[in-house]
Image (cartoon, grey):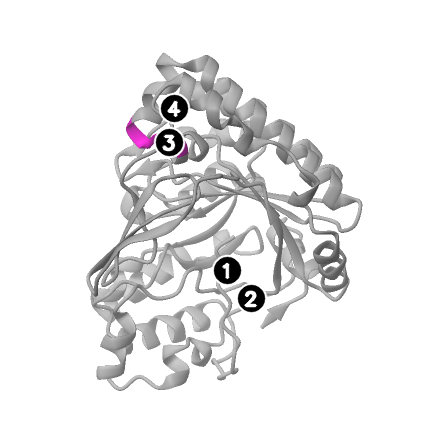
Amino acid sequence: MRYHREEYLSHMLGEGTGREILVELFGPLVGLEAEWRKQGASEDELSLDAFDFDSVEFVWIGNANLRGDRTPGVEYDSPEYSIHRDELGRRMKLIKATATLPLPMDYPVETADDWQKIRHWLADHESRVNEEACRAARKRHEAGALVGFGMLGGFDLPRKLMGEENACMAFIDEPEMIVEMLSAAAGMTCAVIDRIAAHCPIDYLHVHEDFAGKSGPLIGPAMISAYMKPYYTRVWEHAREAGAKIFSVDTDGNVNPVIDALLDAGINQIYPMEPAAGMDIVSLRAKYGRRLLMKGGIDKHVLRSTQEAIRAELEYKLQPAIRGGGIVFGLDHRIPNGTPIGNYRFYVRTARELLGLPPAQTRKGSWRRMAF
């Protein structure tokens, strides 16, 4: 089912629509299509159109990105991997057989002096807002599309510039630099949001952090409160004035220790809620109620197990106690390699039955990535 933005927001904000939402957030991992094709999957199954997932039309109205001024270019390319320099000057390596995102091999900021040299990458400029695109987005918004805007992460921004380890250390050793970075990002982002809002409402503020692993987050609640909360709340205030109802953070891993700090900073949605990292949507709903909106939460790894295990996972995660809005049900990340197509068919069929959804009907071009 394709949801109108008002129906989707009503569901997410807990007002209820009388129907649960089942999605595929990210789609398959690299290599799974070849596995499924060998197992006899149809073209509609390979495209996921056969599974009749729910979705909402989504329009990105912009991202308040870094604007690097380094010349990008390819340094090396082979069937196995490629290395290129991006606009931030980072050497990026992509392993083609297994990855969809390249990983940085070096970074532009090693010292506070390096930061001063590139802080103009966060400068505001009228070219950051395309008025024609805003007007087009407004028309789609009026027709039922959800309009989203992306901000730089309070942890992800230092990581982009310094790397993960140095970013963690900078919160302790270079706090003034972190404050300057986030203050510059906030000023630019708020200015961009205000100019967009003159032409088009914003429904959805999104921030990518990915600051946690299986053992826990890389940054604790005290640092979120001290450094990220001022940044988040400043931007969220402008986004709400532009109409935003949802402030969503994308982070894998175990974020249980920092959920309270994130909520206090304005976040009201987290995804993809990885069970393997200790994220349990049932217990979290019991603890936070609809203060915490969630997407995902179904263990992707169980798909490589037995159909009995898949049913047990679904009967627990889709139980009536956590239905009724505030959750979009789906796998906690990409469909993993090694998932038999038969198990995936069983997973979708069983999930639809438990949620009271009608049997899937193939709809060409229906699947939409719902990771936002």
Residue closest to the eye, 200 or 258? 200
Distance of mark 2 from mark 1, alpha carbons? 7 Å
Question: Marks 4 and 1: CB-CB under 8 Å?
Answer: no
Distance of mark 2 from mark 3, alpha carbons? 39 Å
Residue drawn at x 25%, y 61% is 96
Label 1 Cα neighbours within 10 Å, binned few <14 / some 14-19 / many ≥20: many
Label 2 Cα neighbours within 10 Å, binned few <14 / some 14-19 / many ≥20: many
**Image coords of residue 297 (percent x, y):** 40, 52
- The dot on residue 276 is none
Residue closest to the eye, 356 or 182? 182
- The residue pinned by badge 1 equals 370
- The dot on residue 108 is 3
Q: Earlier in the sequence, mark 4 or mark 1?
A: 4
Name the residue furthest right. Answer: 198
Q: Earlier in the sequence, mark 4 or mark 3?
A: 3
Distance of mark 4 from mark 1, alpha carbons? 28 Å
Residue 242 in view: no
Q: Earlier in the sequence, mark 2 or mark 3?
A: 2
Question: Marks 4 and 2: CB-CB under 8 Å?
Answer: no
Please report the bounds of the magenta region as a residue range. Answer: 161-165
- The residue pinned by badge 4 equals 220
Amino acid, disc 4? Gly
Residue drawn at x 44%, y 81% is 50
Residue closest to the eye, 167 or 262? 167
- Magenta part, dominant SS: helix
Amino acid, disc 1? Met
Check disc 1 and report its element: helix, strand or loop: loop
341 to 116, vertically: above or below? below
Question: Marks 2 and 3: CB-CB under 8 Å?
Answer: no
- The residue pinned by badge 2 equals 55
Residue drawn at x 57%, y 56% is 324
